[in-house]
Image: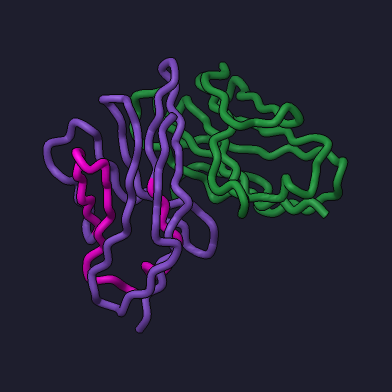
Amino acid sequence: DSGVTQTPKHLITATGQRVTLRCSPRSGDLSVYWYQQSLDQGLQFLIQYYNGEERAKGNILERFSAQQFPDLHSELNLSSLELGDSALYFCASSEGPGYSYEQYFGPGTRLTVT
Amino acid sequence: AQKITQTQPGMFVQEKEAVTLDCTYDTSDPSYGLFWYKQPSSGEMIFLIYQGSYDQQNATEGRYSLNFQKARKSANLVISASQLGDSAMYFCAMREVIQGAQKLVFGQGTRLTINP
């Protein structure tokens, strides 16, 4: 158990809908990262937050947004969902913004868009 | 941009044998970090081992060791005395730092199957 929690574990929704994925980092970690794992794209970095502020952005679509709250939990919002958004979404956390070398991954949220 | 290449889509190994999973990387940054993660069928990503670009010795963690050859830009994972529970996907990743923020760039993975 990495100490990172993600809810829900599974999510099934229809095209055009909006969903919110939630992540709680390990106790003491200030950075949260979101990754998407799909069959065709592999594992891709989406976005990073550190202590409530966006720090780095990867291949995140404009339909997706994220935020980190004062209690350090983070939410990833996916809107206007398409079939291709079906994937495993991981949250990871680390102690620092860039120099802490280990990211701890949560169990993931499996999103299925039908 | 940094790139990670894992050339073995799948590997089959007999239980108790040692196995080497290949990883090559491409970067122009003098400071970088290399990671290996294990992803069993349940889906979670499990950190295995880390190697920093300035580390003088190859990293080891129990049955896992990293064969780091800097000049060849390779960071192969060696699993000694493989066990049935080692069957999983294995991902090599590199830390990329952008303006003080880090992200991981992953390879495509190698699916390892341990046969009894």
In the image, residue B82 sits, relative to residue A49, either above or below, namely below
Rendering colour mode: by chain
Q: Is B43 in the magenta?
A: no
Q: Quadrant of residue A64?
A: top right
Does residue A90 lie above or below B11 as drawn? above
State left or right for residue A62 relative to residue B81: right
Apparent side of residue A21 relative to residue A48 in the rendered image (left or right): right
The percent position of residue B2, horizontal first and vertical second, equals 41, 33
The residue that appears at 12% across and 36% down in the rendered structure is B56
Residue B80 within the magenta-colored segment of the rendering: yes
Q: Position of residue B92 (x, y in %)?
A: 38, 48
Q: Which residue sits at x=42%, y=38%?
A: B3
Tell me: B65 left or right of A109.
Answer: left
Q: Which residues are magenta?
A: B64-92
The residue positioned 54% from the left and 35% from the top of the image is A45
Q: Position of residue A6 (x, y in %)?
A: 60, 44
Residue A103, above or below A54: below
Q: Is residue B103 left or right of residue A102?
A: right
- Where in the figure is residue A74, as x and y percent of width and height? 61, 30
Q: Colour of chain B?
A: purple
Furthest residue in direction left, as rendered: B56
Q: Colour of chain A?
A: green
